[in-house]
Image: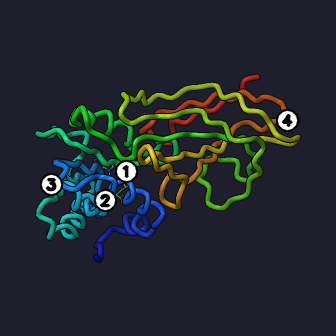
């Protein structure tokens, strides 16, 4: 099937590793399940996957150009209804068996996954599920060439610690968007550190966990004041951000 897309949604469609894990998780549903909401449907690709498992799929997309593409792409699927709207302003009439929400970004900082799910969960049946199910965030100390906040695009940095899991979120829980913690991370060799690398792993369901792909949560490199460290030193980094409020909300501080 050929999909009409915007430039951004074309890149999302071309990320076959991202699509494969969503397809695998959606394919675990029996046919004839009642209702799924696809929140932020973009080109409609995930609604297309959902259409053979659910009697009704309601796909919501805030971007008019993208929702026009989704409407055209899914016009022949009588059980899929595409709506051009902001999920945060939707009061759905029926409760769903499944919410699919791919508004993911590393540590959920730069997209609306958390506010959208906190709003949409009231329209999920008690027995309902969410794809993805949640995330796991890990961090590492790094000595990075670029001393400013950036996503990992094959840039140079040395990893100076083992990864530490610092946060796990289950999307069925009420999520406090304000994250704040002091991370204690052990340096694994002598040298300099000037940042944190954050990696997000996506739990599609109980059985499928996916690391970063080109368009799903590429690692984020966050700078802090340069320090020299010795092997086995513990470095205490205060990390603060608001999920859904963008990368401008990120703050770091080294505690001495
Ligand atoms: C990462 S894209 C995923 C698109 C599509 N689900 C896919 O997997 O290819 C996230 C989409 O969510 C949409 N979006 C973001 N915030 C939204 C909101 N509050 N209401 C509806 N759509 C939203 C964006 O416009 C974008 O198309």
Where disc 3 sits, the SS reads strand
Alpha carbon separation for disc pair 2 and 3:
15 Å
Name the mark on residue 46.
2
Name the residue beneath numbered marker 1. Answer: 102
Is residue 62 toward the left or the right of residue 76 in the image?
A: right
Residue 104 in view: yes
Alpha carbon separation for disc pair 2 and 1:
9 Å
- Picture layout, residue 119 above or below residue 11: above
Q: Quadrant of the N terminus?
A: bottom left
Name the residue beneath numbered marker 4. Answer: 229
Q: Are marks 2 and 1 in contact (CB under 8 Å)?
A: yes
Q: Are marks 3 and 1 in contact (CB under 8 Å)?
A: no
Foreground mark, 3 or 1?
3
Foreground mark, 2 or 1?
2
Residue drawn at 66 percent across, 29 percent down:
183
Q: Quadrant of residue 141?
A: top right
Foreground mark, 2 or 4?
2
Query: Does the closest atom of ligand 1 sit within 8 Å of the Cβ of label 1?
Result: yes
Q: Are marks 4 and 1 in contact (CB under 8 Å)?
A: no
Query: Does the closest atom of ligand 1 sit within 8 Å of the Cβ of label 2?
Result: yes
Alpha carbon separation for disc pair 3 and 1:
21 Å
Mark 2 or 3 closer to N-term?
Answer: 2
Where disc 1 sits, the SS reads loop
Q: Quadrant of the C terminus?
A: top right
- Picture layout, residue 146 above or below residue 247: below
Alpha carbon separation for disc pair 4 and 1:
39 Å
Mark 4 or 3 closer to N-term?
Answer: 3
Q: Position of residue 56 (x, y in %)?
A: 15, 53
Q: Quadrant of residue 130?
A: top left
Question: Looking at the image, which is closer to me, 197 or 245?
Answer: 197
């Amino acid at each position: 099937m050929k999909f009409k897309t915007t430039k951004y949604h074309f890149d999302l469609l071309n990320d076959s590793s991202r699509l494969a894990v969503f397809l695998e998780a959606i394919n675990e549903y029996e046919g004839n399940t009642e209702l799924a909401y696809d929140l932020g449907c973009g080109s409609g690709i995930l609604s297309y996957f959902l259409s053979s498992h659910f009697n009704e799929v309601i796909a919501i997309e805030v971007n008019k150009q993208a929702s026009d593409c989704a409407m055209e792409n899914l016009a022949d699927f009588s059980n899929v209804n595409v709506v051009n709207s902001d999920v945060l302003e939707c009061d759905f009439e029926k409760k769903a068996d499944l919410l699919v929400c791919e508004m993911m970004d590393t540590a959920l900082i730069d997209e609306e996954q958390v506010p959208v799910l906190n709003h949409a969960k009231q329209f999920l049946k008690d027995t309902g599920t969410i794809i993805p199910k949640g995330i796991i965030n890990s961090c590492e100390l790094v000595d990075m060439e670029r001393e400013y906040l950036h996503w990992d695009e094959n840039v140079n940095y040395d990893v100076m610690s083992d990864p530490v899991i610092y946060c796990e979120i289950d999307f069925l829980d009420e999520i406090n968007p304000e994250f704040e913690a002091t991370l204690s991370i052990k340096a694994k060799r002598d040298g300099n550190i000037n940042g944190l690398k954050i990696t997000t792993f996506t739990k599609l369901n109980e059985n499928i966990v996916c690391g970063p792909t080109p368009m799903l949560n590429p690692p984020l490199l966050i700078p802090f004041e340069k320090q020299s460290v010795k092997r086995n030193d513990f470095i205490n980094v205060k990390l603060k951000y608001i999920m859904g409020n963008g990368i401008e909300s990120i703050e770091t501080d080294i505690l001495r």
